[in-house]
């Protein structure tokens, strides 16, 4: 059985930080020592859950899935949210196509995409009362032990041990955002950057403890992956004091664009007005913004806008469409993609006394999602130093299952992570 564990928001940076803390990460350490870890794994843009989860499960970037979280439709003059959009085949769908069985524990990325609520053969299993990884691990173990579990409004029991099983948890992502909902009763919202990091370390430690129970499942092969990392903002740190960090920067960004001679309308949510004479729309969300031209802009005007934005001290990057495409972006997302550097933000932060947290950014702690493989078919003690990417995961997982696919994948099979006997010889995907 291949068990795909998805820890939303878990970056390699958070692993290193938690590993070095007094709490430690003994089970992750064992998984790495006895398996293969990817040291230069990278995600794409936008580094937001829905787009990057679809990239993981299908091996295709947003340029193929069309999932970019949201964009401004200039023809309809409105914000469009892409939700779970993904026309590409998933790992679970590829498995079912090859006659294998699947099951999902809260893995929404395969809900009705290979795993169906109420279908005992290939079930999607979820209990909304379970808010952390510990509870969902117990649900998974109950299912494998033949106990009734909730699926599609009824209780089902195991028919056959699934060939492909996935479990999803957003403990770390929730802690990163630092909102009112946190995964553990004893945890409190962070009011300083140090407390924010401590919460991340604690969440990783708790998940590490639960991981040990999954590693004891007989005959299991584990693929543990994440979609993105995160960064704190809006609170003193990174060379900025509390007042400077807590100041929204959207107005300064708008002014920089206006100085380049562009009439720009800044919007944050559906219903925000866009004047009829606006030449561009700036869709702003916390630590990212998407600039979309409403009228044709000359190369000189575009260059002036880019230079003006990049000169702002709080801006991490301003990417034109060519630079976006190099990171897998859907070409319809925007004309210029802008992100801040920590601890700065554009809008949407509630202010003191709590730290903000985001992953719509281009910091190393955001772009370095954790990924490791362990168990039968996986090489032991391998640390892959070469650059790998999120879209390599799906084809590698399918090779461990002994199947081809997903059909739309553009990544490659990470043969350096696999034993030669991991799967029967397969025809390589045409995009490898």
Image (cartoon, helix red, strand yellow):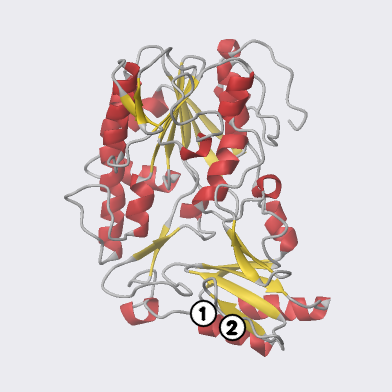
Q: Which residue is mark 1?
A: 250
**SS for dot 1:** helix
Q: Which residue is mark 2?
A: 254
Residue 64 to residue 314: above or below: above
Q: Secondary structure at mark 2?
A: helix
Residue 250: % across, % down: 51, 79
Q: Is residue 25 visible?
A: no
- The answer to whether residue 325 is seen in the rendering is yes
What's the residue at 29%, 43% (across, down)? 131
- In the rendered image, the vertical position of residue 80 relative to residue 294, given as above or below: above
Residue furthest to the left in view is: 186
Q: On screen, 296 above or below 275?
A: above
Q: Do the residues bearing badges 2 and 1 touch, measured as CB atoms within 8 Å?
A: yes
The image quadrant of residue 35 is top left
10 Å crowding of disc 1: few (<14), some (14-19), many (20+): many
Nearest the camera: 186 or 421?
186
Q: Is residue 155 left or right of residue 363?
A: left
Q: In the rendered view, does 8 fall on the left or right side of 250?
A: left
- In the image, taking residue 383 as reference, residue 24 lies left or right, namely left
Give the CA separation, mark 2 to mark 1.
Answer: 6 Å
Image position of 278 with respect to 155: above or below: below
Which residue lies at the image location 56% right of the left edge and 14% below the top edge?
A: 422
Q: Position of residue 90 (x, y in %)?
A: 60, 32
């Amino acid at each position: 059985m291949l068990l795909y564990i998805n820890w939303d928001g878990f970056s390699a940076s958070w692993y290193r930080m938690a590993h070095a803390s007094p709490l430690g990460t003994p089970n992750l350490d064992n998984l790495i020592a006895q398996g293969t870890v990817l040291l230069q794994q990278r995600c794409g843009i936008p580094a937001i859950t829905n787009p990057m989860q679809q990239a993981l499960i299908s091996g295709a970037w947003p340029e193929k899935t069309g999932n970019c979280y949201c964009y401004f439709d200039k023809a309809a003059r409105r914000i469009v949210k892409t939700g779970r959009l993904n026309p590409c085949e998933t790992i679970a769908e590829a498995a079912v196509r090859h006659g294998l069985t699947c099951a999902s524990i809260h893995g929404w990325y395969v809900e009705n995409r290979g795993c169906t609520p109420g279908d005992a053969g290939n079930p999607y299993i979820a209990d909304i009362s379970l808010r952390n990884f510990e509870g969902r691990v117990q649900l998974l173990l109950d299912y494998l032990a033949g106990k009734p579990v909730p699926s599609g409004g009824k209780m089902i029991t195991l028919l056959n041990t699934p060939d492909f099983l996935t479990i999803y948890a957003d403990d770390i992502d929730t802690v990163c955002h630092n909102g009112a909902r946190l995964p553990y009763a004893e945890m409190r919202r962070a009011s300083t950057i140090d407390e924010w990091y401590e919460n991340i370390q604690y969440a990783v430690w708790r998940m590490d403890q639960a991981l040990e129970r999954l590693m004891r499942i007989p005959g299991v092969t584990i693929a543990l992956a994440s979609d993105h990392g995160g960064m704190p903002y809006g609170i003193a740190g990174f060379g900025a004091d509390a007042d400077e960090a807590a100041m929204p920067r959207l107005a300064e960004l708008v002014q920089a664009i206006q100085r380049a001679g562009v009439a720009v309308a800044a919007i944050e949510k559906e219903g925000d007005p866009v004047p009829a004479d606006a030449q561009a729309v700036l869709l702003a969300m916390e630590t990212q913004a998407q600039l979309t031209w409403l009228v044709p802009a000359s190369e000189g005007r575009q260059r002036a806008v880019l230079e003006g934005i990049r000169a702002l001290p709080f801006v991490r990057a301003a990417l034109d469409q060519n630079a976006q495409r190099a990171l897998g972006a859907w070409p319809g997302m925007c004309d210029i993609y802008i992100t801040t550097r920590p601890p700065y933000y554009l809008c949407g932060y509630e202010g003191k006394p709590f730290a903000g947290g985001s992953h719509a950014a281009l910091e190393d702690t955001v772009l370095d999602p954790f990924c490791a493989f362990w168990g039968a078919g996986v090489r032991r003690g391998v640390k892959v130093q070469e650059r790998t990417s999120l879209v390599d995961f799906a084809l590698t997982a399918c090779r461990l299952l002994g199947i081809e696919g997903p059909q739309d994948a553009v990544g490659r099979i990470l043969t350096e992570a696999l034993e030669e006997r991991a799967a029967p010889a397969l025809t390589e995907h045409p995009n490898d």
